[in-house]
Image: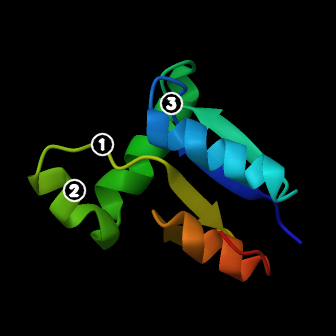
């Protein structure tokens, strides 16, 4: 099973809450801090700038984190979707 990838920033309270919940739920993940590593930021921007999920977010001038990447191409911004996919509850 592929590991969940989480793009976010430690400066973002939503990212911090999501990471805490994933850890408490014992879900393995790889955190890519977009504010701490340029390569992570580039990866995230490529996802954000090419995915229709982000159209409204881009129009509103928002960032759109935390971002959860599952199974190579499945992207969601909803922690509940991730937890349910892993058989966990909020």
Name the N-terminal-most of marks 2 and 1: 2
As helix, strand or loop, the secondary structure at mark 2 comes to helix
- Count neighbours of disc 3 (C-alpha within 10 A) and say few if under 14, some if 14 to 19, many if 20 or more: many
Q: What is the distance, in whole Å, between disc 2 and disc 1 at their CAs?
A: 7 Å
Q: Which residue is mark 2?
A: 57
**Left or right: where does residue 21 sit relative to residue 61?**
right
Residue 22's disc number: none
As helix, strand or loop, the secondary structure at mark 1 comes to loop
As helix, strand or loop, the secondary structure at mark 3 comes to loop
Render colour scheme: rainbow
Task: Indicate the position of residue 20 as horizontal and vertical percent values.
Answer: 70, 43
**Quadrant position of the N terminus in the picture:** bottom right
Can residue 73 be seen here? The reply is: no
Task: Indicate the position of residue 27 as horizontal and vertical percent values.
Answer: 83, 59
Q: Quadrant of residue 89?
A: bottom right
Residue 9's disc number: 3
Q: Is residue 60 above or below residue 35?
A: below
Q: Is residue 38 above or below residue 57?
A: above
Can residue 13 be seen here? The reply is: yes
Name the N-terminal-most of marks 2 and 3: 3
Residue 63's disc number: 1
Q: What is the distance, in whole Å, between disc 2 and disc 3 at their CAs?
A: 17 Å
Q: Is residue 42 above or below residue 80?
A: above
Dots 2 and 1: beta carbons under 8 Å?
Answer: yes
């Amino acid at each position: 099973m592929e590991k969940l990838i989480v793009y976010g920033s430690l400066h973002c309270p939503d990212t911090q809450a999501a990471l805490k919940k994933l850890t408490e739920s014992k879900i393995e993940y790889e955190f890519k801090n977009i504010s701490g590593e340029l390569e992570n930021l580039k990866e995230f921007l490529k996802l954000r700038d090419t995915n229709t999920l982000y159209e409204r977010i881009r129009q509103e001038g928002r960032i759109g984190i935390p971002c959860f990447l599952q199974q190579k191409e499945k992207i969601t911004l909803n922690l509940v979707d991730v937890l349910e996919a892993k058989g966990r509850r909020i």
